[in-house]
């Protein structure tokens, strides 16, 4: 007891210092969150097992260019595969939608069950019906298209 009475000021200073360290640590976590964490969190777990090769993208482009398609490009962002298609002016809306299904045929069933797909189809000159956007979520079987305009 005598030790506590003699060193009362030192003990209070140490306690205040420890409380301040804890408070400052919490404030640092609030204002400067940990940027080391992945942007997608754990949503990309297992993506290395179902990777999409450049060969698959090339096959998609080749298959679509055999049709009335002028330009095809692809992009991958996390679990989202984006396919951009530009069709010729003589293609109607239903034929353009069939190109979305043709593009998905080149992906394996494992890839279709893991990735989400967005298909953007545009046609130069026709702003009444185009662009159209199709979306296939990993758990869905078919493509859902935007409303016809």
Image (cartoon, grey):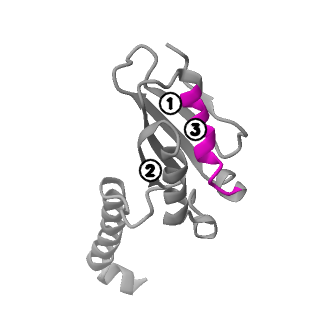
51 sits to left or right of 40: right
- State yes or no: discs 1 and 2 in contact (Cβ < 8 Å): no
Along the viewing direction, whichever of 43 and 53 lies nearer the viewer: 53
Whether the magenta-drawn stretch holds residue 97 is answered as yes
Residue 100's disc number: 3
- Residue 41 visible in the displayed image: no
Residue at the spot 51% in from the left edge and 49% down from the top edge: 81
Q: Is residue 9 magenta?
A: no
Q: Secondary structure at mark 2?
A: strand
- The front one of 128 and 13 is 128
Residue shown at the point (52%, 49%) measured from the top left: 80
* Residue 77 pos. (x, y %): 45, 53
Mark 1 element type? strand
Q: Alpha carbon of mark 1 to alpha carbon of mark 3: how far?
A: 9 Å
Q: Is residue 139 above or below residue 24?
A: above
Span of residues in magenta? 95-108
> Does the rendering let one see residue 87?
yes
Which residue does the numbered mark 2 point to in the structure image?
A: 74
Task: Tell me: residue 65, above or below residue 97.
Answer: below
Q: Position of residue 49 (x, y in %)?
A: 63, 69
Where disc 3 sits, the SS reads helix
Q: Earlier in the sequence, mark 1 or mark 3?
A: 3
Q: CA distance from mark 2 to mark 3?
A: 12 Å
Residue marked by disc 1: 133
């Amino acid at each position: 007891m005598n030790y506590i009475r003699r060193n009362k000021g030192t003990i209070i200073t140490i306690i205040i210092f420890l409380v301040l360290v804890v408070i400052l640590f919490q404030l640092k976590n609030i204002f400067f969150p940990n940027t080391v964490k992945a942007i997608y969190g754990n949503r990309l777990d297992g993506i290395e097992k179902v990777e999409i090769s450049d060969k698959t993208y090339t096959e998609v482009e080749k298959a679509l260019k055999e049709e009335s398609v002028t330009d095809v490009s692809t992009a991958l962002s996390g679990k989202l595969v984006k396919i951009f298609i530009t069709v010729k002016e003589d293609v109607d809306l239903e034929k353009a939608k069939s190109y979305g299904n043709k593009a998905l045929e080149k992906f394996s069933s494992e890839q279709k069950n893991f990735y989400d797909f967005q298909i953007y189809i545009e046609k130069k000159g026709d702003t009444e019906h185009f662009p159209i956007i199709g979306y296939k979520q990993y758990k869905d079987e078919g493509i859902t298209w935007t409303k016809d305009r």
